[in-house]
Amino acid sequence: MSNTYTTVQWNRQKRRYDKIMVGGMALYLLVFSLLQLRFYPNVTPETLIIRATGTLAFLMLHIILCIGPLTRLNHRFMPLLYNRRHLGVATFLVGATHGLFNLVQFHSLGYIDPLVSLFISNTHYLSWQDFPFQVLGFFALLILFLMAATSHDFWLKNLSPATWKKLHMLVYLAYALLVLHVMLGAVQLEQSLSWIGLTGAGLILIVGLHLSAATLEKKRLLAQAQADAILEGFFEICQVEEIAENRAKMVFLNGENIAVFKYKDSISAVNNICRHQHGPIGEGKIIDGCITCPWHGYQYYPQNGQSPPPFTEKLETYDVKVVNGKVWVNPAPYPAGTERPAAIF
Amino acid sequence: MKDEFYIGWQDKAPVSYAQKIRQWILLMIFIIPAVSALLVLGQRPFADSTFEITQLRTMEGILIREPIPCLKMPLGSDAKGIQQFQRILLIGFGKKSAGPTLDAIERAQGQILNGKSVKLAGKLIYVDGTLAMELTEGLQTFKGFSEVPDAPSLHLSLGEATLRGEILDPKCYLGVMRPGEGKPHRSCAIRCLEGGIPPFFKITTQEDARQYFFLLDAHGQPVHDKIARYVADEVQLCGAIEQWDDWYILKIDVSEGLQRLRPYWAKDQHLRMCNN
């Protein structure tokens, strides 16, 4: 975390992340190119570049979309999420190379503007089978561009985390557009089992992982819904022993997403949504006296939800009681950063 | 069990996290080449075509401007002593016909070159013995001419036929692009045909041999702008076949003799044949 903006806040893990990412991209391009030249030596350089970058960008997007649900299912995948934005920007750059070469190859050097040609050459817009698939790729690339351009924390702060998050959820629309782009373009041309199979397997993987993660989350919420005993606006949450030291239990009460932390014989409750990228604070840990978000390490004091100076992020806080070894929480939120006494047990 | 917690800005990830990521990386080292290999090996082979992109050749022959610009090059005589010719389709730079370049050359020379023996420099594009030349050098394309008289060409009427195949732009199909056919190439082919490049029709015989036809309308006039929307589709054409030297020409009535075999199930439909 930082209280100023820099282009990239490099650290050891980010450097390693990027090296592994670039290594994986290079491995793919190398294997693809060598096999292409070995089995189809009369491929043109333009076709080789278009196919290698198009398939690589699509593969990278699959990896990006797997990371979210994987970390929900197993938090040890968290290091993949930490620098996911670099993976996103790299995916856009590879996809943009694919798009640019396509625009030059198929639409330039004619009598009309290449971008105009993209939309008016194939006009079978009402045909499912003949639909101009390149247009779908264009709009997907546009979404990836918006995401890459706003991936910096400057935009996160200035757009507000909620707006930023909504914008970046468009990645699912981009993925849907790209699945259609691939199915109506390359797959329709090749009509090969491996192209159809890989596209289908990718779709099943993405949908399957998201459904699994959603099912897990739903189970957690259902279990919580059963804790419905009310005491003067307080809800019974669990036994004190059920919360590990320096860890939290996450609950949904009256529409509030709350993380209840246990530390040094005390219990405090704060809003469960990190102000950075809406990460799940309750999956974090108290380190050096601060709640630490599992996604990017943003920190907050448990008693008042404030980030340690000079940082300015704040979370809403909640009243907590411990009665007969049981933890009770009042879901009425206090304004972000309000000091509330911890419940001592 | 040790309560490990991962923070990205710390120097090292906890052991259990690092182990999981190592497993992920190993999985990726297997998956990345596997996906790459499956995609490459799942492709259809490319046409055995050639575009001599780095080689400039000078060809000499009789210049024919209409209806399909070409150079008619003498090949020698056959056993009966009849002069044989090979035609080389002339195409402009990019997705344009040879017309503007030839117009500029004629203006610069101050005379009509049609029917004269000219030397033109360009880049050859060819597949299955069918040749085209891209005129890439502007006015430098023209390397001179002579008043050698044009010898008579073979010009045969071969009757009417109903043929099924794909309309292409010859520039890309003959070798500039691989693949230069099919749906991904449709937009490019439309740009080429609307740029004035004459349309080309490919059929595949029952013996899996490819046969090519240049398309003209029923009156022998260029038809490129009228059929650009049918490229990359499987179509049925009815028309009169002629042979001009080594080229086959199919003259079609666009309003009557052209049917798109779409959607895909229409391929098996009984469609009206020529003269039925």
Image (spheres, helix red, strand yellow):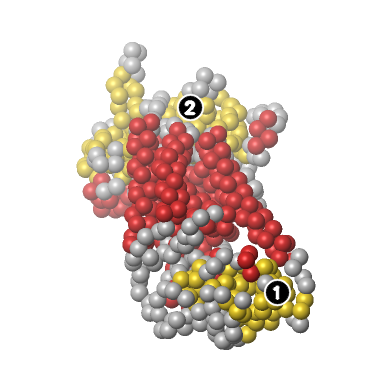
Q: In this rendering, is residue A162 above or below B253?
A: below
Residue at the disc numbered 1: A324
Residue B20 at least partly seen: yes
Q: Which subunit holds the residue at mark 1?
A: A
Mark 2, other Cα within 10 Å: few <14 / some 14–19 / many ≥20: few
For the point 47% across and 30% down, the residue is B212
Residue in the foreground of this view, choosing between A121 and A310:
A310
SS at circle 2: strand
Q: In which quarter of the image is residue A213?
A: bottom right
For the point 65% across and 48% down, the residue is A127
Q: In which quarter of the image is residue B217?
A: top right
SS at circle 1: loop
Q: What residue type is labelled 1?
A: Asn
Nearer mark to the viewer, of 2 and 1: 1
Residue in the foreground of this view, choosing between B158 and A310:
A310
- Whole-angstrom CA distance, mark 2 to mark 1, is 90 Å
Coordinates of residue B9 in the picture (x, y in percent): 39, 67
Residue in the foreground of this view, choosing between B129 and A345:
A345
Coordinates of residue A139 in the picture (x, y in percent): 53, 60
Residue at the disc numbered 2: B211
Coordinates of residue B19 in the picture (x, y in percent): 43, 50
Coordinates of residue B106 in the picture (x, y in percent): 29, 49
Q: Which subunit holds the residue at mark 2?
A: B
